[in-house]
Image (spheres, rainbow, N blue to C red):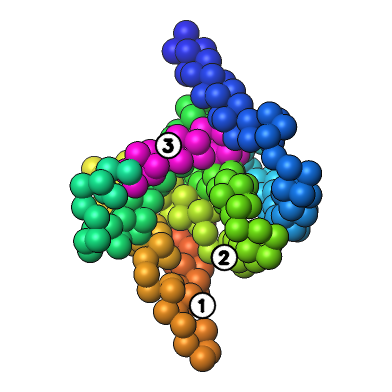
Amino acid sequence: MKKNIVLFIFLLLSAIGLEYETQAYTTGSMSGTSYGIVGLSALLALLYIIPALLLIRQLGKKWQTPALSLGVALLGGLFISGWTSGLANTYIHEWVSTSFPNTLLSDLENAIAAPLVEEPLKLLAVAFAVYLVPVKKLKSFLMLGITAGMGFQISEDFSYILSDLPEGFSFTISGILGRITGGIASHWLYTALTTLGLALMLRYAKTQKNYFRVGLFYFLAAFVLHFFWNSPLTAIETDIPIIVPAMTALAVFIFYQAYRKAHKIDQEELEVE
């Protein structure tokens, strides 16, 4: 009975998200030019979205993660985490703009609010997937985090396309191209770290404190990486790009270490069995 209730809640939130995310395109309120820009931007986004989803499918098979669980995580990230975090971020922005204008908090609002809002809501998509189609291996948890984060990333890409439209063709196209290059180490990676970190903490809180501390590190690392990516640091320009590439390299390095840790622990537990 509980699982049916959770399934209904998941379907309801997803249906709301589908309507919310697509209403701008289905009402006919945009001009023909705007639809053309959206279409071209979407095609550009698909250049990374399709390969990413195919890779997720292949890794899911290799890491023995149920396809249905991956599907729930993807839909949750795409149609639940996206619109709920979007609304939350909007309300926070309005509150900060009204209550703390021209302050350090207003300057750092996006860097602070985005991780605190988006990371837990992306984990909600993972929670639905784990509850409805349970997994045990840590690499499967990592895979679900990647998938939910990718769903959210796709949702956010299309929301940025819409928000950039008023600025014209060049700004919108350059924006989606920037999202594509920035997607190398973005939401898929953050959610993978928070998911694995939380799984380690919950599994080893009472048995192996070392693994618990490792999980806490990965969990917090996602928030810190997200904070710095949204901070004013990324706006600093240098002759040779340094700051953003350094952030990307650090994020990918931490993710690689997280994968190695998940693989090592899975192998240890398999040998014990």
Are dots 1 and 3 in contact, CB under 8 Å?
no
Q: Badge 3: few (under 14), some or many (20 or more) residues near its Cα, within 10 Å?
A: few
Please name the residue that numbered disc 3 is placed on.
87
The residue tagged with tag 3: helix, strand or loop? helix
The residue pinned by badge 2 equals 182
Where residue 245 is drawn, which disc sits there? 1
Residue 101, image x, y percentages: 24, 55
Q: Which residues are magenta?
A: 72-93
Q: Is residue 143 left or right of residue 195?
A: right
Q: Earlier in the sequence, mark 3 or mark 2?
A: 3
Q: CA distance from mark 3 to mark 2?
A: 23 Å
Does residue 83 belong to the magenta stretch?
Answer: yes
Determine the secondary structure under disc 2.
Answer: helix
Q: Position of residue 138 (x, y in %)?
A: 48, 47
Q: Is residue 103 visible?
A: yes
Discs 1/3, front: 3
Q: Residue 147: give x, y in percent of width and height.
A: 58, 45
On screen, residue 260 above or below 92:
below
- Report how far apart the C-alphas of labels 1 and 3 lie in the structure: 30 Å
Residue 81 in the figure: left or right of residue 41: left
Residue drawn at x 46%, y 55% as measured from the top left: 190
Amino acid type, callout 3 = Leu
